[in-house]
């Protein structure tokens, strides 16, 4: 968690997970307490929460399977690509992609630098105001 999430994206104030043993283990609870991160688990029978998590998990696994069909020896790269794909996808509740919401810019793709394409930045306050009008 520390290397893959905190060091890359910054430490969150809180995280929401399902009730899986990998998230409710004492080691995880101790780590999150030391880091002062609030941990909330979704109710096992609250279908809106668990359904959303399971849909993302299913999408992630489908993307991972497709990538593995091409080369099974690059699992770490496939996990990163599947994650990036999900983070670049439109999310209805945000009105944009998670990447754009967090970074307040469009992602820089490898070919863009070679082609000298200018970056486009977005204004999160404007996005929120537009979302509230809908």
Image: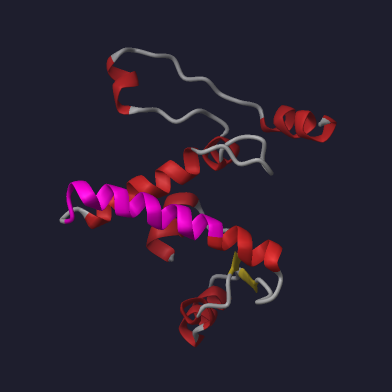
Quadrant position of residue 91: top right
Which color mode does the image show?
A: secondary structure
At a point 52% along the width and 20% down the height, the residue shown is: 120
Residue 38 vs 104, above or below: the answer is below
Of 123 and 109, nearer the camera is 109
User: Would residue 67 be visible to someone looking at this image?
Assistant: yes
Q: Spot the residue most to the right.
A: 133
Vertical order, 120 against 27 (above or below)? above
Residue 52 magenta: no
Residue at 62 percent across and 62 percent down: it is 51
Please tell me how many numbered marks the rendered image carries.
0
| Above or below 77: residue 38 | below
Confirm whether residue 79 shows in the render. no
Image position of 126 (left or right of 22): right
Most common SS among magenta residues = helix
Picture quarter with the C terminus: top right
- Is residue 92 toward the left or the right of residue 130 in the image? left
Q: Is residue 59 magenta?
A: yes
Q: Residue shown at 39%/53% (left/top)?
A: 62
Quadrant for residue 42, please give it.
bottom right
Q: Where's residue 67, x and y in %?
A: 28, 48
Q: Nearer the viewer, residue 117 or 10?
A: 117
Q: Residue furthest bottom?
A: 26
Q: Residue at x 53, y 29 (%)?
A: 105
Residue 78, position in %: x, y? 29, 50
Residue 133 point in image, percent of width and height:
84, 30
Residue 73, percent across and down?
Answer: 15, 56
Does 4 appear above or below 36?
above
Locate the N terminus and report the quarter of the image it occupies.
Answer: bottom left
Span of residues in magenta: 55-72
17 vs 63, nearest the viewer: 63
């Amino acid at each position: 968690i520390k290397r893959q999430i905190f060091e890359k994206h910054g430490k969150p104030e809180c995280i929401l997970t399902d009730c899986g043993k990998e998230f409710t283990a004492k080691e995880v609870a101790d780590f999150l307490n030391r880091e002062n991160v609030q941990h909330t688990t979704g109710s096992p029978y609250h279908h809106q929460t668990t359904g959303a998590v399971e849909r993302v998990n299913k999408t992630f696994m489908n993307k991972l399977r497709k990538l593995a069909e091409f080369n099974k020896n690059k699992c770490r790269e496939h996990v990163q690509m599947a994650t990036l794909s999900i983070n670049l996808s439109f999310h209805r509740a945000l009105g944009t992609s998670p990447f754009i919401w967090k970074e307040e810019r469009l992602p820089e793709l490898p070919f863009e630098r070679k082609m000298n394409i200018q970056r486009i930045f977005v204004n999160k306050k404007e996005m929120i105001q537009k979302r509230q009008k809908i």
